Image (spheres, rainbow, N blue to C red):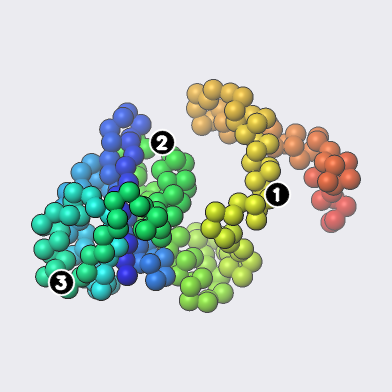
Amino acid sequence: MWALDFMYDTLYYGRSFRILNVIDESNREVLAIEVDLSLPAARVVRVMEQLEEMVGLPKSIRLDNGSELRSAVFTSWCAEKGVELKFIQPGKPQQNAFIKRFNRTYRHEVLNAHIFESLEQVRDITEEWSRAISKIVLMLHSGSCHRYTIDNEKKIDIRNIYFLGGNTPQQNTYLERFNRTVRYEWLSQHYWQSINEVQELATQWMYKYNNQRPKMALGVITPKQRLAMVV
């Protein structure tokens, strides 16, 4: 079964755009992320036709009740292809949980991480991100533990990656505590005018954190001092 959903965002000068996400629920593969100013029903059909040529079509699709997805253009096409449409109940997005979780990840790691100047930039960054995330997810679900090269230089052995359970940030306690410290001590203390300004202050703060701030958990020594003892 596939899942399908729309998202919205804006370019830096305020022009809004839409995103159509399609994933395979069985293995969490990202099948399509279509980005444009407008995505009417005919465009959704075109995306489905492209996927049909690439990977075939599913027996069913889980989706919400948006006007494009309820349109005769889209529903008729799916009926002709023998694809069952499983509409969720209005007001219950949790019934499409897999793609809603994917949407949150995409927004956090891509949409909220960049200030986009053009649709081309959105597409380029999205394509690079989707290739990386799809390969990692596919290997995890296939049980493969081979190394995956993201940029032909950095290699990750997924046997050493530990994924949290859904909605359980307490499983990553140390990093969550560090994130709170970062936000309290400098992110929330400034009004940023540029990325360079954020990067410069982050570098300064990180140096002080690692070299000049003793940690009670480390026996009242700094992280650098602790690292020197281990080495």
Q: In terms of secondary structure, where does tag 2 sit?
A: loop
Q: Is residue 31 visible?
A: no
Q: Please state which amino acid type lies under the numbered disc 1.
A: Tyr
Kindly indicate whether the residue at mark 3 contacts the one at mark 2 (C-beta within 8 angstroms): no
Q: Residues within 10 Å of mark 1 (few under 14, many from 20)?
A: few
- Please indicate whether residue 215 sits to the left or right of residue 201 in the image: right
Tell me which label, 2 or 1, sits earlier in the chain: 2
For the point 56% across and 74% down, which residue is it?
145
Q: Is residue 104 visible?
A: yes
Residue 71 image label:
none
Tell me which label, 2 or 3, sits earlier in the chain: 3
- Placement of 110 over or under 185, stated as above or below: below
What residue is pinned by disc 2?
Answer: 115
What residue is pinned by disc 1?
Answer: 174
C-alpha separation, residue under disc 2 versus residue under disc 1: 29 Å
Q: Please state which amino acid type lies under the numbered disc 3.
A: Lys
What residue is pinned by disc 3?
Answer: 81
For the point 65% across and 52% down, which residue is it?
170
C-alpha separation, residue under disc 2 versus residue under disc 3: 39 Å
C-alpha separation, residue under disc 1 versus residue under disc 3: 50 Å
Q: Residues within 10 Å of mark 2 (few under 14, many from 20)?
A: some
Q: In terms of secondary structure, where does tag 3 sit?
A: helix
Picture coordinates of residue 126, whole percent (x, y)? 38, 51
- Placement of 179 over or under 204, stated as above or below: below
